[in-house]
Amino acid sequence: MIVVTGATGNVGRPLTRALTEAGEQVTAVSRHAAPVPDGVRHAAADLAEPAGLTPALDGAKALFLLLSGDLHAPGARPADIIGLAKASGVRRIVLLSSQGVATRPLGPSRVAMRALEDVLRESGLEWAVLRPGGFASNALAWAESVRTRRAVAAPFGDVGVPVIDPADIAEVAAACLVDDRHTGGVYELTGPEVITPRQQAQAIAAALDSPVRFHELTRDEAKAAMTQLVPAELADDTLDIIAAPNPAELRISPDVERVLGRAPRPFNDWVARNIAAFR
């Protein structure tokens, strides 16, 4: 049995599907009840209260650990989840970390995530760490404005980073969960090209065959929107990167191809698969 946290999200959904298609038994964990693929067990649990995860971990051999936004806040104790997993007999954990742990190690949210990585390394469990950069699926934040006004609003419109398709993260995670060769691996995950928010809006417009207007937000406007979903520290750390990515954050990593034997998917591919959200 493999337990997938964040199972209804942009990484968890394709990961659950990939593991099921590979013949693995999966328990999908999310905060609320949600539909899951046939043959998948669902467990409702709030990771901010790790004890609630205990029933889902019963009989599990591996855990995919994705932190919800509140577990990035000051005072959160995500390391308790690792201790609980070990006590429950889990042998392997694959942690979804962040590229910024290496590229911006002094950011408050990055310090906390690096500390969690260190707890995992020292746990005595088998482990792998995934460090993705920006997600292609962050563009879903524009879906409502594109549908209703054919408009995209984002900060730093002409500053790009190599965003990663969450489906690629999921496939790498699946490999790390089932293949011993990836034990002890730390994988930086990026897309195949640097792409700006303005270019992303153009890609959505092309897929819709309809013009999409781009409006550039100030940093303060962007932070106000982000902090409705994530702690202020995480919003600031993210905005620091997308405002002025350093050379390490602009680098196209070879790690997706190293694990999967193919290049990462470009943003246009993600748009084509998700265009219904913008119609």
Image (cartoon, rainbow, N blue to C red):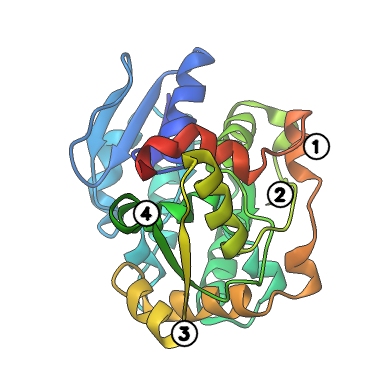
Q: Is residue 126 depicted above or below 163 in this figure?
A: above
For the residues bearing labels 1 and 2, Cβ distance under 8 angstroms: yes
In the image, which is nearer the foreground, mark 4 or mark 2? 4
Q: CA distance from mark 3 to mark 4?
A: 19 Å
Q: Residues within 10 Å of mark 4 (few under 14, many from 20)?
A: many
Q: Which mark is residue 187?
A: 2
Query: Is residue 36 in view from this perspective?
Result: yes
Q: Is residue 278 depicted above or below 171 in this figure?
A: below
The residue labelled by disc 3 is 218
| Amino acid bearing label 2 | Tyr
Quick check: 107 left or right of 153?
right
Q: Which mark is residue 146?
A: 4
| Amino acid bearing label 1 | Arg
Q: SS for tag 3?
A: loop
In the image, which is nearer the foreground, mark 2 or mark 3? 3
The residue labelled by disc 1 is 258
Q: CA distance from mark 1 to mark 4?
A: 36 Å
Rendering quarter of residue 243: bottom right
Q: Which mark is residue 37?
A: none
Q: SS for tag 4?
A: helix
